[in-house]
Amino acid sequence: MNDLLIIDGISKKYGNKTVVARESFNLKQGDILGFIGPNGAGKTTSINMISTLLSPDSGKILFHGQDISRGQIAFKKALGVVPQDLAIYEDLSAYDNVKFFCSLYYLRGIELKERVKEALTFVGLWDKRKELPSKFSGGMKRRLNIACAIAHGPELLIMDEPTAGIDPQSRNHILQTVKTLNGRGTTVIYTSHYMEEIDVLCNRILLMDEGRVLEDLDKQSYKEKYAREGCKTLEDIFLYVTGTNLRDTEE
Amino acid sequence: MKNFIPIFQMEMKRRSRDFFIIFYNIIFPAVIILLLGYLMSKSYGTEFTSYEFYAIVIPPFCLLMAIVSVAYAAQDEKRMKTAFRFMSSPVSVVELVLAKFTSSTIVLTICSIIILGMAKLFFHLSFHGSFALVVFLLFCEAMAVTGIGLFLGLACKNFFMIKNFMNLPIMIFGFLGGVFFPVNSLNPMLSSIINSSPLTWVNRGIIYSIYGGNYTILLVTGGMFFLVGGIAILFAVRLFKREEFI
Amino acid sequence: MGYFLVVKNNFKRNINKKTGFLVNLLLPILVVILGIGANYVSRPSLTLGVIGEHTTQTYTNIVNILRNTERITIDTADPYTIKVDTITGKYTAVIAFGKEDFEIYSVKDEATIRGLESLLRTYAKNPESLKIEEVMGTSMSVSQRTIAFIVLFLMVTSTITASLIIKDKNNGTLKRYKYSPQKAKTYIIGNFIYNFAITYCQYFISISLMMILNINLGISYINLLLMGIWITALATSFGNCIATVFRQEMYASLFSTAIVLVLSLIGGSFIAFEYMPVMLQGVSVISPIRWFIDATNGMSYGINWFSNTRIICIISGMVLILLVISVYINKKNRVI
């Protein structure tokens, strides 16, 4: 598999505090990368740098070998982001929400309509397309949030805790959605605090803490490596590597 | 009313640190008095200066503008997503509303006193023994402003629609009340329109008290504001919408 | 064309809330019409109170002529409330007639009192009605005050219309916009076009209603419509700029009102430019209202809007600067 994304020594500092310190990893095409770490580890900052909302203080991010700081538009066309907080218009119908955000990726006419229909059907909201999100349940809003991010057919999809605060049925649906998307060729960076989701979904897991990458292994290698330490589950491994102390970090 | 005191204390802290209440009721009036006073300085003589005129009319106008800040302050908990905690605790609506009402009225009155003090110090505005009465009138106006603001913020279903336009009628009242330049007319129709502005009566009340020794308009206007404030608070409590608050 | 995506989207968002949209659209029109009406009806005038001897020839000559002088109203004053009546503006001045002569009581400046005295002495000798412009030097024309009023209100209401930008910042959709390949300027210009359309619509309906109601400002309809384009552009760019700076609608609304009021004061909305203190005359160049008042002055004499090249350039420059600031702030806005 080719390297879709190369993160090469990126770092970010706020004042005296180093939030991300010379982070490097490669993302291969077709991966579902689980991006985990305690609160304040630097996951969100890393994601914001990858999605170009923040500029790294140093280092490079290459997409298909091209520096994204130079070819931002081409990169953004291939990027989809499902933010942790809902980012939908409560006063537009589900259809109009997806249509508007999809149209920002230069899609027009029949192709646009087909993509919107495909995205809404994919997340199970086609029947509710004319309704306003203000009438949706939490799970439905999350699914709409995802539809807005995938309608334009991104090559790389970043999902930041997409299942926070929803019921098991909606969560299961979302996880199946991610697997199907990956099956169709979308590479996914997936962050979550639910280790069982990461365990089920991801083929590779990157563990961060205090701005540094601590481990970057495939799932099987984690289990083999830490089985000797008595870690049976991914959560055990997480707590073993990062410790059990509370993280009182500043925003 | 056991919960009144802690909520009142919190609201007092919040209101006294609210940048916009301080800006709109101390800094902004001072700037406008200076600006208008300077602008119109050539239009007035030495016996009664433009600075004195604007030191009288601007504080009540800025106090009236505080309806907007108070209405938003009423929705603080909704914005900060802590409303659910209030509604699920043993705090009664009366305690909540009264705490907000009392704290806002006190803070707004203190701001008005500061501005009047600055007027006395820097613009040599003499109150001729009517300072306490003027403060009383502004206190009553603060009550009315707070009452109406809380009613709009807590009990009004269409607050989201009207919040954007609350400034406009206040500006019109300002114009009619002679805040920017003296406005009066002997034409009966125009006179009625001018008299429809509460600021017309506030300004007249203050001027008649200070320069005419006649306190009737001031006391009646103060009484009306007191009544309006009381009624608005009653309605705010009665029509309080939990779903709007949460 | 990303701009029109934003425009179309904003219209869709508002049309879904029909009542709110109609209120947003029509209420400012109502306010502008009322304001225009109020300005038209309360044209500058002198209200004089009289006290004292009513039986002298001096009194008869003066008071009768004053009653026939345009824009002067006479009323019998209360001698115990002269000071408060002049301070509140009930009377511009009170004339106290004695047996032979009269005295003028007013809080106005020396020049106004002297002007009034000169007018009255002229009337005492020669009972022929005169124009009173000398006495009312600080007043502006109806058209100037009306246009200043319209600009002031449209700047405030434009900020209200631009509150969609603040909503986008708070509900996360601006963040989603920034993930897309669209540029910051596309978003700002799209919002500008949307706001411009709504605001010009409000202006157009207000001006047209005024024409229908026969309220004559002394400026042709075409000139008003053309000037309206620049008024709207300025109001819209100002509103958008304020909305990009603040994260809460209340702060944007209150701050815009404060700024507009100050610009209005220094721009000459309340006192003719020539009568402002010299220092403020210099400062007034930053106020767009000052330039619209200048243009109105010319147009009331029949000059065409496009003859005001200097003013058009200045206003266009202000619009551009505000747009650039909006784009820059939007780009730098933390959405995370």
Image: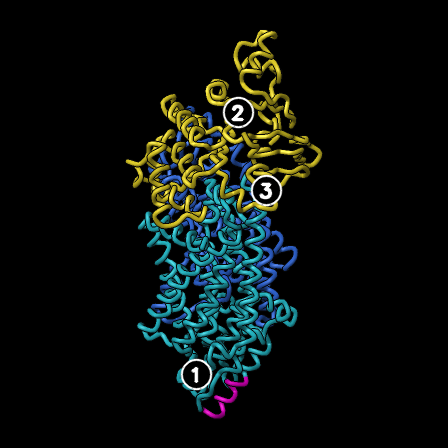
Q: Name the residue under label 3.
A: A68
Q: Which amino acid does label 1 sit on?
A: Leu
Query: Viewer-proximal residue, B42 or B221?
Result: B42
Which residue range is magenta in the image?
Answer: C118-127
Of badges 3 and 1, the one in the foreground is: 3
Q: Quick check: A131 above or below C112? A: above
Q: Residue at x 65, y 31 (%)?
A: A20
Q: Calculate the distance from the C-alpha at mark 3 to the C-alpha at mark 2.
A: 22 Å
Q: The blue chain is which one?
A: B
Chain in yellow in the render: A
Vertical position of residue B118 compared to residue C203: above or below: above
Q: How crowded is mark 1: few (under 14 residues within 10 Å), some or many (20 or more)?
A: many
User: For the residue marked with disc 2, what is the amino acid?
Assistant: Gly
* Tag of residue C150: none
Chain letter, colour cyan: C
Letter of the chain that mark 1 sits on in the rendering: C
State whether discs 2 and 1 lie on one chain. Answer: no
Q: Mark 2 points at which residue?
A: A34
